[in-house]
Image (cartoon, rainbow, N blue to C red):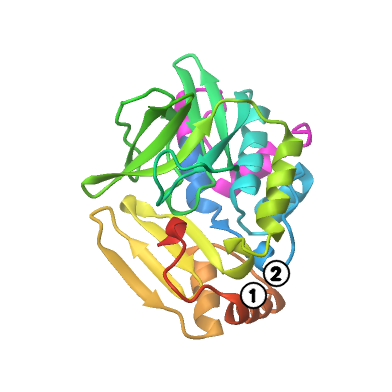
Amino acid sequence: MSDEVFDVDAWLTRIGYGGSRAPTLETLRALIALHSSVIAYESIDVLLHRPPQLDIASLQEKMIAGGRGGYCFEQNMLFRGGLRSLGYNVTSLQARVVRGLEIDAPRPMLHMVLRVDLPEGPFLADVGFGNLAPTAPLKLSTEVEQATPHEVMRFIAMGDELTLQSRLGDKWEHIYRVVFLPRFDAEYEICNWFTGTHPQSPYLNNLIAALPGPDGTRLTLFNARFNVRHASGRVERRTLQSEGEYRTVLSEQFGIMLSDGDLKAALANVEQKRTWGAPHPFFA
């Protein structure tokens, strides 16, 4: 998946960035904040039985020109293409999601993350983790609390892996364990096919979207449940009742533009297959 055809001007216009293009930590910080707050995390194509395409041309057509978001492989593949086009040294990695689990839970590597090497050291960049994607670059150092525009985060060692944690209220919650073995794009294709087609995948059975908002807020949509979580921990909850409400929330809150046909098909699939209990822990 070549990054050579990446249209950096279109990407920067899409996310509203007009600053320096020098591959610095300051630029990276601004790019992560803008990309994550403009291009929503969403998996609606999976719900519509369209496994996401990970080539750069398809990602740009969907997420830059098409007014859509994407889930982890799409988001971080696109972001990687943008970073490399600006001259950043980026290594593709994977992570084991342990959100809501024990820190040492035996988990497969089904999440894509990026290592960005800078003069200040190696940093994690991840614009594709649902409602807890870091909204700032995180230095890959242990036991150091790192502020972001949203939660405070840190890494703690777990064998050869680093566990990313987020401070939610007065507790540290596990997010995922970063594996430092560089990955080939073909390995992401395998993971993408699994998460996009397996019958038990939450993405195949639920309408999911997430977006970090201003003032430390986090917006999440899990089927009919639309939540706005504030930095204080207070959560505004709303249940969507009609196709019109879905369209308004998707377009005005998440910036997701769906055709009438896609929205109707997505809602029909949700009604048939959705998870009726508590939301998936990524989107609670």
Amino acid type at circle 1 is Ala
CA gap, disc 1 and disc 2: 6 Å
Coordinates of residue 151 in the picture (x, y in percent) = 32, 44
Q: What are the residue bounds of the magenta stretch?
A: 1-29
Mark 1 — residue?
A: 266
The residue drawn where x is 64% and y is 26% is 182
Residue 6 seen in render: no
Amino acid type at circle 2 is Leu
Which label's residue is closer to the chain start, 1 or 2?
2
Whether residue 11 appears in magenta in the rendering, the answer is yes
On residue 48, the disc is: 2
Whether residue 112 appears in magenta in the rendering, the answer is no
Q: Secondary structure at mark 1?
A: helix
Closer to the camera in the image, 229 or 82: 229
Closer to the camera in the image, 233 or 11: 233
Q: In which quadrant will I find the C terminus? A: bottom left
